[in-house]
Amino acid sequence: MTTATRRAAATRYQHKLEKLFTNAPETKREAANLLIKRAAFLLATEDELQSLMQQEGPIGVYENGSQSGVCISAYLKSYTMANQQLLSTIKQLTVFLPADDSASQSALNKFFADHK
C-alpha cells in the first residue's frame, strides 16, 4: 500500500466517522475529532497490515547468528497493537455520542462491525 493509498483510506474512514457525530454538541464534536482522526489512521493501518499478512503470513523467520527459527511476524505484532489501540479509541468515542441518540450508537457499532 502506498502512502497516498493509506492516506486516502484514512480520509475515507474519517469522513464516514464524522457523519456519525453530526448530532453531537459542538464542544463534544471538537474533542471527538481528535479521536476520529486516530481511529481513521488505525483503521487504514490495520487494512495495510492485513494485506501484508495475507501476502507473507503471520509467521516470520529469524536468523540470529547460527540460530534460526520461526516467530510471530512483526506485521501480526503491529496489527495486534493497532487493534488494541483502536478498541480503546472506540470506547472513548462512544462517550462523545449523545446518550439519547441510539441511532448514532447503532451506526457507530455497525461501522466498526463492518470493518472487521
Image (cartoon, rainbow, N blue to C red):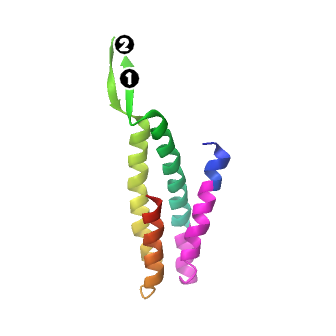
Q: Is residue 103 magenta?
A: no
Q: Residue at x 38, y 25 (%)?
A: 61
Q: Residue at x 43, y 88 (%)?
A: 100
**Residue 50's spot in the image, x, y percent?**
47, 45
Q: Secondary structure at mark 2?
A: loop
Q: Which mark is residue 65?
A: 2
Outermost residue on the top side: it is 66
Q: Secondary structure at mark 1?
A: strand
Of discs 2 and 1, which sits in the foreground? 1
In the figure, residue 77 lies in which quadrant?
A: top left
In the figure, residue 78 lies in which quadrant?
A: top left
**Residue 46's spot in the image, x, y percent?**
48, 50
Q: Residue at x 39, y 62 (%)?
A: 88
Per the picture, the main secondary structure of the magenta-coloured stretch is helix
Vertically, is 68 above or below 102? above
Q: Residue at x 33, y 26 (%)?
A: 70
- Which of the image's four quarters has the N terminus? top right
Query: 61 left or right of 3?
Result: left
Q: Nearer the viewer, residue 92 or 12?
A: 12
Q: What residue does disc 1 label?
A: 62
Vertically, is 47 above or below 30? above
**Residue 34's spot in the image, x, y percent?**
55, 65
- Residue range corresponding to the magenta coloring: 9-33
Residue 98 visible in rendering: no
Q: Nearer the viewer, residue 15 or 92?
A: 15
Q: Tell whether label 1 touches label 2 (CB within 8 Å).
A: no
Q: Which mark is residue 37?
A: none
